[in-house]
Amino acid sequence: MNLSLFDDDDYAAIGPAPLVPGTTASTLLRGFALPAVTQLLQGLDAIVQAAPLRHMATPGGLRMSVAMSNCGQLGWVTDARGYRYVRQDPASSEPWPAMPPGFLQLAQDAAQAAGYPGFLPDACLVNRYLPGARMALHQDKDECDFTAPIVSVSLGLPATFLFGGNARSDKAVRIALVHGDVVVWGGADRLRFHGVAPLKDGEHALLGSQRINLTFRKAL
Ligand code: MD6
Ligand code: FE
């Protein structure tokens, strides 16, 4: 089913643009994931069946409003012992589900389009936002190698992405991310603070009342 006025490929053809003015290290690829959505949703179903979405606790003991799972060799977790990557799902003690080939291909294509050829992610964090869920400003710094970018795929309800600076106190720019958008993030921007404003209520034709975010990382 084609729910847009344009072919999926027309969106992909809009081409890379800086996420915010003044940087070339972070790129917004509007609609880049649209041709892969069917594959992504199939893969997602299998992943959350094997490794169900769950609300993890921060090291400070707060329940996160975003529900999370992972696929790939490594998965990001948080609990009383801190933030880290682990090879097994703590809920099952099984390895995380493998990263589906279509996920890897999309992440590599997006990284290449944004000027980061040779990206080989070993971790994909799955985030589910229901209305009201949010992500506080944070840095992604649990990975070993900050030379690799992060590729972030948005599906479902629109969200306001908050893109700050290298200090927590730097003012954040607000960027609307919609279904199919991909953000690639690296280089000089790799440690910038960022977050997601509370998700507004709504109904998405394919995903219903939720937003799914996939972030691909090279954790090792
Ligand atoms: C989200 N994303 O969009 C949360 N991190 O749901 C992130 O925290 C994120 O989108 C690093 C790079 C891109 C991101
Ligand atoms: Fe992040």
Image: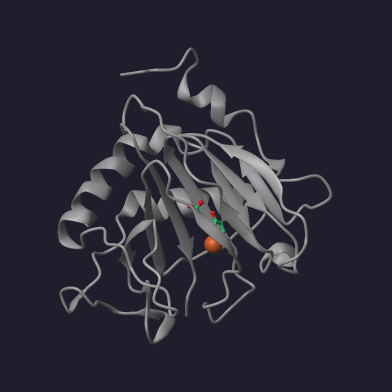
Instruction: Name the residue located 40 percent from the left edge and 68 percent from the top edge.
Output: 123
Up-down relation of residue 6 to residue 46 (above or below)? above
Between 204 and 107, which is closer to the camera in this rendering?
204
Q: Which residue lies most toward the top here?
A: 5
Instruction: Name the residue located 84 percent from the left edge and 49 percent from the top edge.
Output: 22
Q: Which residue lies most toward the bottom here?
A: 81
Q: Quadrant of the N terminus?
A: top left
Q: Would residue 66 be found to the left or right of residue 109 on screen?
A: left
Quarter residue 88 falls in:
bottom left
User: Where is residue 181 shown, x and y percent of the image?
Assistant: 53, 38
Q: Would residue 208 be found to the left or right of residue 147 on screen?
A: left
Up-down relation of residue 36 to residue 204 (above or below)? below
Q: Which residue lies most toward the right here?
A: 22
Instruction: Name the residue located 62 percent from the left edge and 75 percent from the top edge.
Output: 146
Quarter residue 82 falls in:
bottom left
Instruction: Name the residue located 36 percent from the left edge and 27 percent from the top edge.
Output: 203
User: Where is residue 140 shown, x and y percent of the image?
Assistant: 57, 69
Q: Would residue 92 be found to the left or right of residue 29 on screen?
A: left
Q: Total of numbered circles in the picture?
A: 0
User: Where is residue 20 shown, x and y percent of the image?
Assistant: 75, 45
User: Where is residue 16 shown, x and y percent of the image?
Assistant: 67, 40
